[in-house]
Amino acid sequence: MSPILDHLPEFWQGLLVTLELTAASFAGAVVVGLAITAMRVGPVPVLRAIGTGYVETFQNLPLLVLLVLAVFGLPEIGIKAGLLATSMVVIALYEGAYIAEALRSGVNAIAKGQGEAARALGLTFGQSLRHVVLPQALRTVVQPIGNIFIALTMNTSLVAAVGVVDLTAAANRVNLVEAQPIPIFVGAGLAYAAVAAVAGLVTGRLERRLAVAR
Amino acid sequence: MTAPPARRRSSGPASTLLFDEPGPRARRRITVATVAGTVVALALLALAVRQFAANGQLAAARWQPYATWPMWRYLLGGLRSTALAAVVSAALAMAAGLALALGRLSRRRPLRLPAAAYVEVVRTIPALLLVYIVLFALPRYGLDLPLLWKLVVPLAVSNAAGFAEIFRAGVLSVERGQGEAAVALGLTHGQSLRLVVLPQAARRVLPSIVSQSVGLLKDTSLGFVVSYAELLYSGKVLANYNGLLIQTYIVVALIYLVVNASLSKLARALEARQPRRRIPGAG
């Protein structure tokens, strides 16, 4: 364990970057996902097409390609942002497509009568989405969104490949100095597993709390 | 107005849950939203084009190379390596995934526990960390794999867990009666699994298998880290050579998009042919 203890500050710093990336890009992804879902379930054909195109594009591109394109390509067209900020935005846009897809299947799983009842009560599109459809849709997609969160956490490690010093990069750097791969990589793996375990626990509890007998 | 046919669980993109057939006012509002949406989209596009132009990235000379065959030959060579890595790791991951799924469904504890542990643990380890382990840890223990395998092994290890969960969900989705009937006919447990349950499960999981394979193909872009000359790494080499960073990576992204979108379309076509609901994939 000593290679980890000797380099605790580096690991801690890396873990913080990973957590920061995870939290910020997940928040961004939820916003993107909600917006895209609203476009895709609405009555405007153009917006539906844009939403579908967005999801198709981002789900079919590797995240690493997007990261490389953004980190090395954007400065070429005069868009210079910090490495960490760029990574956050890219991951948020990418995972937003997955959240949108999960939310859409949640919306589609809702009985048609719910939407009809909301309209019969005179709610507008936005109101029926906000007060009737989304609360029910969110309930059914807690588990899928939890899985997306875990996948997002794992995906943040890709930023190590474009130069952000996250947990994966920190482990790699410490290993280059210490050359004791087993404890170092196992330690990093355990840290990721811990984040995923917490996420699993939270989604499990959320699901039970939100469960409604039908 | 006649009621539209009841579509309680339409899984297609045409969800009409939230609106009725539009009347005159709604049609007007839709027109307004259409115009607004189009204007915003075009404005964003114009902004991007302006940004490209302002930095001289639209100059014909910077795109010209991608109208020539040698550049494409190089990138398509990368695509071939991508396909090779994807096929080899998919084959390994599917075989391992099937074994893990059967292990996890087994009635024997010593088989069930390790399989479950593998799936749960690997699901929470980033693929890049596995790549680093193969790149930097294994050589210290005298295991220096050839370049292709440095990419294939971590991908197979991580995707095996995903395939395992898909296969398991597929087997569980086959009605109990099928296995029971097979046993009642005198088949052994193994025979009923092989002859009755698995063939039905295989057909049902096909769409999920294709989407998991799209994910795996996306993962092969980790060749960028391994220096295995798949598509993304080829793009990097090319960009370093001709200095056309953004152009090269855009072309690379478009190739990935075309290949993966075709595969995803195949998955949807397979799904549409299915009489039953789809097994949700992991990831």
Image (cartoon, coloured by chain):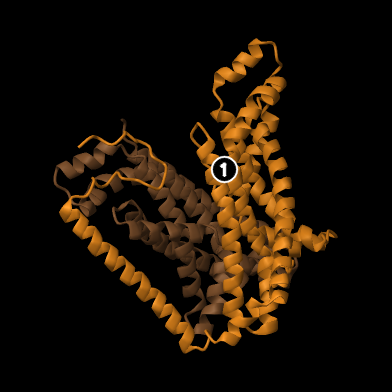
Chain colours: A brown, B orange
Q: Position of residue B103 (x, y in %)?
A: 68, 33
The image shows residue B163, relative to residue A192, as above or below, that is above
Q: Residue at x 53, y 74 (%)?
A: A70
Q: Position of residue A202 (x, y in %)?
A: 43, 47
Q: Residues within 10 Å of mark 1 (few under 14, many from 20)?
A: many
Q: Chain of mark 1?
A: B
Q: Is residue B112 visible?
A: yes
Q: Residue at x 63, y 30 (%)?
A: B105
Q: Residue at x 14, y 46 (%)?
A: A122
Q: Position of residue B257 (x, y in %)?
A: 56, 62
- Looking at this view, is A111 or A34 the one in front? A111
Number of residue marks: 1
The image shows residue B221, relative to residue A69, as above or below, that is above
Q: Looking at the figure, which quarter contains the N terminus of chain B?
A: top left
- Looking at this view, is B239 or A28 the one in front? B239
Q: Judging from the image, what secondary structure is the residue with disc 1 in? A: helix
Q: Residue furthest right?
A: B142
Where residue B44 sits, quadrant-wise, is bottom left
The image shows residue A16, relative to residue B169, as above or below, that is below
Q: Is residue B279 visible?
A: no
Q: Position of residue B166 (x, y in %)?
A: 59, 39
Residue at the spot of label 1: B208
Q: Residue at x 72, y 21 (%)?
A: B191
Where residue B67 sits, quadrant-wise, is bottom right
- Looking at this view, is B204 or B155 the one in front? B204
Q: Residue furthest left?
A: A122
Could you tell me the amino acid type at mark 1? Ser
- Looking at this view, is B153 or A167 the one in front? B153
- Using residue A201 as the reference point, say whether residue B76 is left or right of it: right
